[in-house]
Image (tube, grey):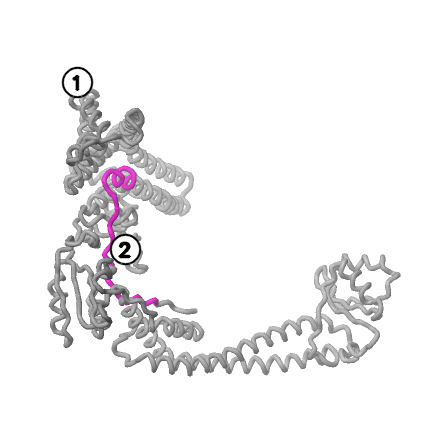
């Protein structure tokens, strides 16, 4: 429910100890580095622009892992005993072995594929009963093997004048496997005829000798021999994988570790190639321990702490700090943007309103318990962050389902509970009998949420010392006074409690706030101590623009409040859909009725749960966040080893 305080850490020492310092920062898990400031260059410092010594070797080891299908797993890089020279030599030898085996494997795979293709082709020519060697030895006759459709073969009668002999050898559906013979001097003309009939030529493999039967047996022998060799190569590659998996993972993790440390050198400024200077942020509660940890180092390292806001050019990173219940809702806050360091963390407001609105819109005890179970499974098995949100909203859905008296669509299953435990004659809320109450309550909840959001903006305005924003904006004090007065006045008139809309009250709580919003720019400059306001487009342009903006502000109060009607609408929608499911179940009997209830509940939970989740998120972003949240902060990202572990296939 807050933003964790940060401290600025400065480190300096001899350049030879830079990698040791960076390694220490990496191991701490709390150091957020900052880019070198421009002023350092004017003081003789320069940035380190070096090529990463480990990046090339890291890419090589990943390629080796992919070629051997080695699943990269994390090891302890500092305990492996590797160095860059040792890794380079080892990879060179391993790459040679892999390249030799893989090249031969590809050759064999291509050859096997060709043999299989050749077998299929020659098998259709088995009726030829002629020696291939004799056929291809003909000097003045050209021979063409191939495929021709049965329909096209009938059209050959139109070409009796052409010099060719056509022989269908076998038939496969509507296709002939065939051969035709033609004199060499008329080959071009005959080939054109067959091409026009969509003849698909097939070339008999050069290694086919003798009759088709002999050729098939010969290719079978070659295929068997090459497949056996291919199996031997696969075995050798598997052995190579088994022998080197552990070492490949060690090399990968060591290189990734050293590469990440080397990549951090860009954050350091160097003086005379002898000394370095490094700045970053750590959480304030960790700052003293982080600083003290450098005192035990053998080399002398200077480490001193400063307030995080001492340099306006360096924006402190933001680390949100929330209780276990609201922490999952940080995901929604970060989707909109990270709050600035000087602002407040809206996660509590988001978590509270999201849970409340979702429960109201999706109230069912049984379905709420299902959401809790699904959320727990999503997080435990797949570590999906949305699972934690589902457990929270599931609790709210179950609670409001108890209030509505709905359990998987059964509307009177909890009646004994109300009578025996709470002493009620019926359930607290009958959805279809209290429709007006639900819609009015939804608008009332929306009005409270909007007023709280405006209050947050006023608080931020005062905190940032932006009095114009806090006092005169449509989401400032002027807007809040106008909104609450109109709202309270309307409620009093509708309930017969009195009439606030008298001339003095209208002048004080309507006209004056509207005038303040209309003149928000000059008034804002005035309270900020700035003089001489002159509209950029002239006074006429200023009046016209602000008039229409003021009209938009007033209209937005109405539309934003009424948009919360969807909350009540979804209560009715959910109850209506479950009524349809129960009505359909009554049309069947026995197991079929139960099946309709089960699948109906699953359908409603999936479809309406998704719609409600999206609609509540829309209300959060457009009706709440848009009033006060800027999202201009930088997230706290401490340096860590970026293991890119992926199981290669």
Q: Secondary structure at mark 1?
A: loop
Q: Residue furthest right?
A: 161
Q: At 35% from the left edge and 45% from the top edge, which residue is drawn?
A: 610
On the image, the x and y values in percent for residue 437 come to 24, 29
Instruction: Give the number of the disc on residue 376.
Output: 2
Q: CA distance from mark 2 to mark 1?
A: 52 Å
Question: How many neighbours does mark 2 have within 10 angstroms: few (below 14), some (14-19), or many (20 or more)?
Answer: many
Seen in the image, is 488 located left or right of residue 571?
left
Relative depth, front residue between 342 and 305: 305
Mark 2 or 1, nearer chain start? 2
SS class, disc 2:
helix
Image quadrant in which you'd find residue 285: bottom left
- Between 585 and 152, the one nearer to me in the picture: 152
Q: Is residue 185 magenta?
A: no
Task: State the residue position of label 1.
Answer: 499
Q: In this rendering, would 145 be left or right of 585?
A: right
Q: Quadrant of the C terminus?
A: bottom left
Q: Residue at x 12, y 65 (%)?
A: 289
Range of magenta residues: 619-644
Q: Position of residue 307 (x, y in %)?
A: 13, 56
Q: In this view of the protein, which residue sits in the foreground, 363 or 36?
A: 36
Q: Is residue 629 magenta?
A: yes
């Amino acid at each position: 429910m807050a933003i964790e305080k940060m401290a600025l850490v400065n480190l300096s020492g001899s350049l030879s100890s830079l990698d040791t310092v960076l390694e220490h920062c990496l191991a701490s898990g709390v150091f957020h580095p900052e880019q070198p400031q421009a002023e350092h260059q004017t003081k003789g410092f320069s940035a380190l622009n070096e090529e990463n010594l480990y990046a090339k070797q890291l890419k090589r080891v990943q390629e080796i892992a992919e070629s051997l299908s080695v699943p990269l797993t994390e090891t302890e890089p500092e305990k492996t005993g590797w160095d860059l020279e040792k890794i380079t030599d080892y990879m060179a030898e391993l790459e040679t072995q892999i390249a030799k085996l893989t090249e031969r494997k590809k050759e064999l795979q291509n050859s096997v594929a060709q043999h299989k293709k050749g077998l299929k082709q020659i098998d259709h020519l088995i009726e030829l009963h002629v020696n291939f060697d004799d056929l291809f030895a003909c000097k003045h006759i050209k021979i063409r093997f191939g495929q021709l459709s049965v329909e096209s073969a009938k059209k050959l009668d139109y070409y009796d004048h052409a010099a060719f002999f056509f022989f269908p050898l076998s038939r496969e559906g509507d296709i002939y496997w065939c051969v035709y013979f033609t004199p060499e001097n008329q080959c071009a003309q005959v080939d054109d005829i067959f091409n026009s009939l969509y003849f698909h030529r097939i070339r008999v493999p050069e290694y086919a000798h003798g009759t088709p039967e002999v050729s098939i047996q010969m290719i079978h022998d070659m295929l068997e021999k090459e497949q056996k060799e291919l199996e031997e190569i696969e075995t050798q590659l598997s052995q190579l994988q088994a022998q080197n998996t552990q070492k490949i993972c060690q090399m990968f993790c060591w290189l990734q570790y050293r590469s990440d440390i080397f990549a951090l050198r860009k954050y350091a400024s160097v003086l005379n190639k002898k000394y370095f200077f490094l700045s970053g942020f750590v959480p304030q509660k960790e700052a003293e321990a982080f600083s003290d940890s450098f005192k035990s180092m053998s080399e002398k390292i200077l480490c001193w702490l400063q307030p995080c806001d001492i340099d306006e050019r360096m924006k402190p990173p933001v680390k949100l700090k929330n209780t276990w219940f609201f922490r999952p809702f940080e995901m929604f806050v970060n989707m909109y943007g990270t709050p600035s360091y000087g602002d407040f963390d809206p996660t509590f407001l988001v978590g509270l309103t999201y849970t409340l609105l979702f429960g109201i819109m999706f109230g069912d005890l049984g379905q709420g318990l299902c959401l809790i179970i699904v959320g727990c499974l999503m997080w435990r098995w797949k570590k999906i962050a949305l699972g934690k949100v589902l457990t929270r909203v599931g609790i709210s859905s179950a609670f409001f389902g108890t209030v509505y008296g709905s359990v998987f669509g059964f509307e009177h299953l909890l009646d004994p509970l109300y009578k025996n435990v709470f002493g009620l004659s019926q359930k607290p809320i009958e959805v279809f009998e209290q429709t007006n109450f639900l819609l009015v309550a939804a608008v009332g909840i929306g009005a409270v949420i909007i007023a709280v959001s405006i209050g947050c903006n006023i608080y931020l305005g005062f905190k940032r010392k932006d009095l114009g924003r806090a006092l005169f904006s449509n989401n400032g004090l002027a807007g809040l006074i106008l909104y609450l007065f109109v709202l309270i006045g309307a409620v009093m008139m509708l309930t017969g409690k009195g009439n606030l809309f008298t001339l003095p009250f209208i002048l004080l709580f309507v006209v004056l706030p509207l005038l303040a919003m209309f003149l928000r720019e000059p008034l804002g400059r005035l309270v900020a101590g700035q003089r001489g306001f002159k509209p950029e487009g002239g006074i006429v342009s200023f009046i016209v623009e602000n008039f229409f903006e003021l009209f938009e502000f007033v209209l937005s109060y109405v539309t934003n409040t009424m948009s919360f009607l969807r909350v009540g609408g979804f209560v009715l929608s959910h109850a209506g859909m479950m009524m349809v499911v129960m009505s359909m179940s009554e049309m069947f009997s026995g197991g079929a009725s139960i099946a309709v209830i089960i699948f109906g509940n699953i359908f409603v939970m999936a479809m309406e749960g998704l719609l409600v989740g999206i609609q509540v998120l829309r209300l959060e972003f457009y009706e709440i966040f848009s009033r006060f949240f800027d999202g201009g902060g930088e997230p706290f990202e401490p340096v860590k080893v970026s293991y890119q572990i992926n199981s290669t296939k």
